[in-house]
Image: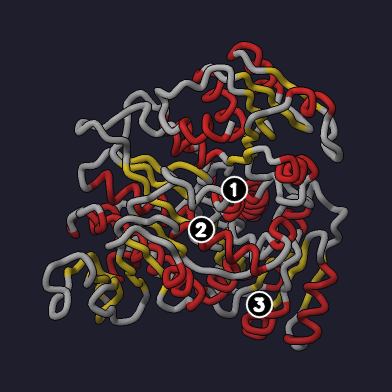
Amino acid sequence: MNDRLDSLTSWNADWSGLRVAVLGLSMTGFSVADTLAELGADVLVVTEGADPEYARLLPVIGARLHVGGLDEVPAELVAFAPDVIVASPGFAPHHPVVAWAQASGIALWGDIELAWRVRDKVLRADGTPAEWLLITGTNGKTTTTQMTAAMLVEGGLRAAPCGNIGVPVLDAVRDPGGFDVLVVEISSHQLWYLSHQISREGAVSPHASVCLNLAPDHLKWHGSFEAYRDAKAVVYANTRVACVYNRTDAATRRMVEDAEVVEGARAVGFGLDIPGPSDVGVVEGILVDRAFLDDRRTSALELCTVDDLAAHGLAAAHLVADALAAAALARSLEVPPAAIREALIAFHLDAHRIQNVGTVRGITWIDDSKATNPHAAASSLAAYPGAVWIVGGRLKGVDINGLVESRGPATKAAIVIGLDRTEIVAAFARHAPSVPVIEVDAGETEDVMAQVVRIAAGVADDGDVVLLAPAAASFDQFTSYADRGRRFAAAVQDLTAGGADDEHDDPSGSRDA
C-alpha cells in the first residue's frame, strides 16, 4: 500500500477504491471528504458530532458517516481497515484514534498534505500549479496572510488567502478559476500532521515561508512547548526561495538555521530596526526592502511609511511587523514596491483585532478579542498603556504570570472573566498588587459582557481606554472569540444608547474563524 500512496501525487492519479477514513466533520473535514469522494476514493467520515448540513450532504457526495464517541476506536473504523486516515486539525497527537493509527502503521495525513498532492487540479497559464506561501506563528497569522494576499492581488497576481484563515486549502485548490498563488495560513496543528511527510519525495515545498513569532500556546494539544516549537519549525521545510524570520525572535532564526531547505533558499529577516543586506525593516519611519534588489548592500527600496500605516490604524508595532513580513513574502514573488504600498493603505483589519468599537463619554473601547493568548495580549497592552484591561477565559494550559508581571503594573485596573480566573487574580496579587482587580462570576454567561462593560465604565475616566484583550480562549463562556467580541461591542452600543453622543464603528461586519 505504501507504494500506491507514494504514487498519489496528482489529481490525475488513480485514487479509485482507496479506503480513506476522515476524522472530524468541520469545514475542513467536509472539504477533505468532498475532495476524496470526487477522486473516487471509498470514504468513511468518523466524528463525535456532525453539523446537520454536512451530515445531509455526505451521502449525496457518496461518503459514509459514523457518529459516536471516540474515547475508544470505533469498531466500524477498525472493520473499515483504512489505507490512510486524514485527520482534521482538532485531533491532537494523543487522541485515541490518532494513537491507534500510528501504532497500526496506517498512513496519517492532514488536509494540507492531501491538498499538496492534488494541487495540479487547476493549472496556471504556464501549465504549472499555483505557488504556495506558508504563514505561521503564535500571533499575527491571519493579518499577515490577508496583507500578503492583498499585495499579490495589487501586483496583478491571482491570489487566495486560505487554510487556517477559514477557507480550506482544498477548496482553493479545486476552485475552477484557478490561482497563481495560494497564501496559506497554517496552524501548529496542521504543521504537526505535515511533519510526518516532510522528508518524503514530493513533500510540500513552498515558494516562501514565515514563522512570525513563537510564544507558549496550545500546550495541551502538543504536550509541551518543545513539541509546539518543533511543529512550528516544519513551516520552513523544503522552502525553495525565501525563509522569512523575525529578527527579534531568536527561536524563528534557529528554525531557519536548522531547516532542511532547497539549495539556494535565502534567509530574510524582518524587524522594526534598520535592516541588514538581506532583510526588510524600518529606516527613519520608512519601511524598506534590502533583500529583493540587486544592489542590496548599498541600497534599499521604499515600500511605504509608518505614517501611511498610522493613517489606517496599522501603526502598532506588531502590525508594522506583520506588514514587513507580508512585504517580504510578496517581494519574493517580485511584487513591485508601489503595489505593496497601495495594498497597505487600502488594508483594513478584521473585526475583533484592535477594533475601536466606540467612544462613549470620553472613554475609548477597544475590542481585541482575537488576542487569545498572552503573547497577543502583550502586543495590545503595549499599544494602549494605562488601559482598563478585560482579561480571562480558558488559558489552554499557558502560564499567565509573565504577561501580568510585564504588562499588569501599567494597567489602570483589571476586570477578570472566565473559567480560569483564579490564576489571573493570583498573578495580579503576586506581580501587580496595587492594580485594582475586579472578578466577574463565570456563571453569568448570558450577560457577562453587559456586566463587564458596566463595571469598566465605572472604573474608567474621560480619556481612558478599555481594552478587551483576554489572553485566553473564549469557549468557556462564548461560542468563539468573535462571539465574545460581538457581545462586547453590543454592550458598548447599549452604553451609547444610554446617552452618549460620540460616534462608534459598526462591528456588524465581523466574521467567525
What's the amino acid at mark 2? Val
SS class of the residue under badge 1?
helix
From mark 2 to mark 3, how far is it between C-alphas?
Answer: 27 Å
Q: Which residue is mark 1?
A: 193
Reply above or below: 128 against 437.
Answer: above
Does 446 sit left or right of 59 as displayed?
right
What's the amino acid at mark 1? Tyr
Q: Which residue is mark 3?
A: 403
From mark 3 to mark 1, how far is it between C-alphas?
Answer: 30 Å
Which is nearer the eye, 428 or 169?
Answer: 169
The residue lying at 74 percent from left, 69 percent from top is 415
- Total tally of numbered discs in the picture: 3
Question: Can I make out residue 498 in this image?
Answer: no
* Tag nearer the camera, 3 or 1: 1
Picture coordinates of residue 179 (x, y %)?
31, 35
SS class of the residue under badge 2?
helix
Picture coordinates of residue 480 (x, y %)?
67, 47
Residue neighbourhood size for the residue with mark 2, other residues' Cα within 10 Å, grouped as few (<14), some (14–19), many (≥20): many
For marks 1 and 2, the one nearer the N-term is 1
Picture coordinates of residue 266 (x, y %)?
30, 66
Question: Can I make out residue 492 in this image?
Answer: yes
For marks 3 and 1, the one nearer the N-term is 1
Residue neighbourhood size for the residue with mark 1, other residues' Cα within 10 Å, grouped as few (<14), some (14–19), many (≥20): many
On residue 234, the disc is 2
Does 424 sit left or right of 303 as displayed?
right
